[in-house]
Amino acid sequence: MCRQSLCKRSYDCRTNETLKIGQEDLLHPAPFEPTKLDFYIGEKNPRQFHDDKRVGAVAVRKDIKEGEQSVWLNLEPYIQDGTLEWKPKEGEWTVYILYLSRNQGYHRSYINMMSLPSCRVQIDAVYEPHYLHYKEDFGTTIAGFFSDEPELGNGHIFEGKNLLGMTPDLPWSEELEERLKQELGEDFLPGLAMLWENHADPQDTARARYAYMDAVTSLVKQDFSEQIGTWCREHGVKYIGHMIEDNNQHARTGSSLGHYFRGLSGQDMAGIDDIGGQVLPQGEDENLDQGPFRTRIGEFYHYMLGTMAASAAAIEPGKQGDSMCEIFGAYGWSEGVRLEKYLVDHFLVRGINHFVPHAFSAKEFPDPDCPPHFYAHGNNPQYRHFAELMGYTNRACELISGGRHVAKAAVLYHAEAEWTGKCMPSHRVGHVLLDAQVNYDYIPQDVFAQRNKYQVSVDQGVLKVHTQEYSVVLVPAAQFITAAFAQAVRELSEAGILVCFVEEYPQGICDIVKSNAECERLLKGLSSAEVIRLEDAADIARRAGAGDITICPENHRIRCYHYEYEDGDGVCLFVNEGTETYEGSVELKDGRFGYLYDAWENMLHRADYDGNTLQFKLEPLKSIFLVLECSTKQKNAEDLVEKPLFKTSIAEELEKGQWEVTELRSEWMRSTCRSIDYPAFTDRKEITLPDKLAEEKKLFSGFVRYENTFYWKEGQKAILEITDAYEGVEVFVNGKSLGIQIVPVYRYDLSEAVKPGENTLVIEVATTLEREMSQIPDQFGVIHEPVVPSGISGMVKIYVSE
């Protein structure tokens, strides 16, 4: 029941050249040659199987002209006495010897994702024993089961460019063989050469590759994902997890499952993960291509990863709007709460409403595996600060759960297009839309082939997919599309739903095997849609009714997420992913009024309206919710202003009030301590700000305490402002803690803690563990030089009301 591979040897030959292939090469594929990473992560002493089998010998002609049909020849009759001998009369050919083998790949003992009984082994060996011992805890203490990065397992581990035609072996199973017989006929085996042949007729190649990948991913969905999900729900627990999504691997075999939506079909949440270096501040256009763990397509991580999961959660009835991100892992010890706040906001504003923080480690400190570790046996100075971040995350997640995401633009998911030919990745369209604050979902072509599953209806002007209602469908450039989607294009257009092909029309239909006339008919029907330029996608989507939120002035780093509840209330979450404070307005198309909610401070603020336009200001690394009440709950804007819970934000008080800066001594007393020793501060000395602690103590990590005094007169209001610090800040006035903040600018209202006369001010800054850990190699033996500053790196001011 172990995983199995379809693999090949290939040989080039030409007119009147005799090709001879001996018995050994006809019986066995080339031995698998593991990379260093295969050996490090895979099985150290892999099993050796003895059931290699040749399944075909086929020659494919390479020198066909464009538009000519593929020419291939079955060479099995040319095998005599264990040797293949063949001499082509004319032309250039590639000869493929096709095999089945279990001796390929780095996880040879892995289950076969396309075999129902093989996948059942995991349930019998792991799930059933847990249920036997802990039945009473299922659905309470035990919430469910998590699949972490299941894989088809062919090729080399984390091989990012393993497109069809490039990978050395491909997944196989008996069930897959039966599916292909049904789709392509009993004599399909020689045609499998098309999975590697890149010089054949593109239409023939597309049909073979689609048939193969459609069968593979459908079986993964049925045998693995839905089998486990059904078992979990029958036993009162949930099934969640994620596959490898990295750099569009979600649409490929190898370390992933070939199709994001199918691979997670059985799960109760749409899962993803984000690990070190994938999502980065200002990383939208930052690309790397330096091998495993050092490769990133910035556009994918910023414009597809989070939205893809939120889209699956929205359009699949079984997921009930629930999405999940495994987050924070493997960024290294330099990652602290400042970056973690950015990452949380990044995924919140793309619709993720559940998080699995990675990681706590029970191993002895320091564990080199995928840091940072939040507690680290008391060694992480930011543990209490991390707790504050999790409180914020819970409050924010609550507001984008239980309702539906408002997105009137649908972008077609590109997996099938990538399997079958040239294509534009979906995230390129997402990039244009997100930068223009146009909310969108990714939808697979399965939506149009499995309408009952996705609860699809087409009404005048609206494509409804489960809870989602779209007025425009944008199709990234694709050489081939499915018949189901091609058929839907005319239907959508006739119903007044705008369908746009980005840059070009498709050239073919990938899943019609014999009827060329039907292909031509479907392709002609695409003319009911229009072709648009990529850069025009956002403007066209807005004109089609997809732009329900507009900000002025334009800014391509302000992100927004519109969410509605059944009772008519809603929220809009705004996040500033840029480097500069944004000040402008947002226009609400539905004319509702609302108020602002700061989830970090857990505080309501009055919204500054001018007609349907809201004025707002948002600093980098900050977020704000606009809470919208349905019209039946409000009489007019003035009623909202009078809500008794409204408070003015400290930033707004500073901006609109009359203030003077009170005197602080220019010299501060600074002391330090490691996290494990807190609060036993030592090394007390006098310093000035900004602090040069990183230069003085290059290997110090822990808490930094700054002490000063100031005078205050009764009747005044006092506000503290710290322009920058690394990273988590806690302020004490006269011994009273005023709370923790984790991103600049740090502002505190001191009014409730001050007393007439002299007051003591203490600022404690928690660093990351980066500097202390910088001399210890990571799990791959690499030393990382520290780059993050330490302590107060900005200035400190106290403002008092005049």
Image: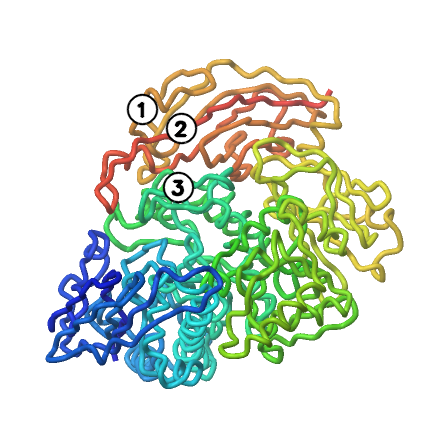
* 3D distance between C-alphas at marks 2 and 3: 28 Å
Image coords of residue 268 (percent x, y): 50, 71
Quarter of the image with the C terminus is: top right
Image-based side of 452 in relation to 238, left or right: right
Which of the marked residues, 3 or 1, is nearer the chain's N terminus? 3
In the picture, the disc for residue 790 is 2
| 701 and 229: which is toward the camera | 229
Image coords of residue 439 (percent x, y): 66, 54
Q: Secondary structure at mark 3?
A: strand
Residue 145: name its quadrant: bottom left
Inspect the image, locate mark 3, and give the three-letter code of the amino acid beneath it: Leu
Q: Secondary structure at mark 1?
A: loop
Check whether the beta carbons of the residues at disc 2 and disc 1 lie within 8 A of each other.
yes
Which of the marked residues, 2 or 3, is nearer the chain's N terminus? 3
| 704 and 116: which is toward the camera | 116
Which of the marked residues, 2 or 1, is nearer the chain's N terminus? 1
Residue 320 shows up from this direction: yes
Residue 46: name its quadrant: bottom left
Q: Secondary structure at mark 2?
A: loop
Q: From the image, tell me which residue sits under label 3.
A: 288
Inspect the image, locate mark 2, and give the three-letter code of the amino acid beneath it: Ser
Image coords of residue 284 (percent x, y): 51, 42
Q: Is residue 714 above or below residue 493?
A: above
